[in-house]
Amino acid sequence: MEARFIDLEMRISHQEDMIDELNKVIYQQRNRMDILEAAIAELARRLAEKGNNSVTLTHEKPPHY
């Protein structure tokens, strides 16, 4: 019976360590997502400042064709 309790304690300890590691990963990913979202917002702001007049999307073939 005591060996069974020891086994359960070891499993719980391992799971607690795993949960801590997963929480660290989630925290790092959230930070990275925040940085990427800020970068996207900045790019969208810059694009809006330039306006659609300076960005022309045409379907013409480039001159080297």
Image (cartoon, rainbow, N blue to C red):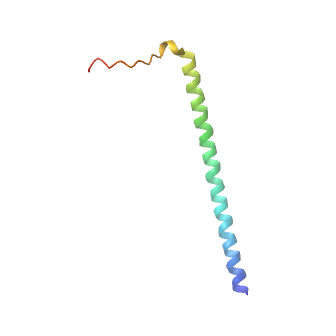
Q: Residue at x 67, y 75 (%)?
A: 10
Q: Residue at x 56, y 21 (%)?
A: 46
Image side of residue 65 versus residue 5, left or right: left
Q: Position of residue 57 (x, y in %)?
A: 44, 19
Question: Which quadrant of the view contains residue 18?
Answer: bottom right
Farthest residue in the front direction? Answer: 59
Q: Position of residue 28 (x, y in %)?
A: 61, 48
Q: Residue at x 65, y 69 (%)?
A: 14
Count how many numbered circles sit on residues in the image: 0
Farthest residue in the bottom direction? Answer: 1
Q: Position of residue 63 (x, y in %)?
A: 29, 17
Q: Which of 39/51 is in front?
A: 51
Farthest residue in the left direction? Answer: 65
Which quadrant, please, contains the C terminus? top left
Question: Which quadrant of the view contains residue 13?
Answer: bottom right
Q: Residue at x 57, y 31 (%)?
A: 40
Question: Which quadrant of the view contains residue 2?
Answer: bottom right
Note whether 3 is above or below 52 in the view shown. below
Image side of residue 64 versus residue 5, left or right: left
Which quadrant, please, contains the N terminus? bottom right
Note whether 2 is above or below 15 in the view shown. below
Q: Position of residue 33 (x, y in %)?
A: 60, 41
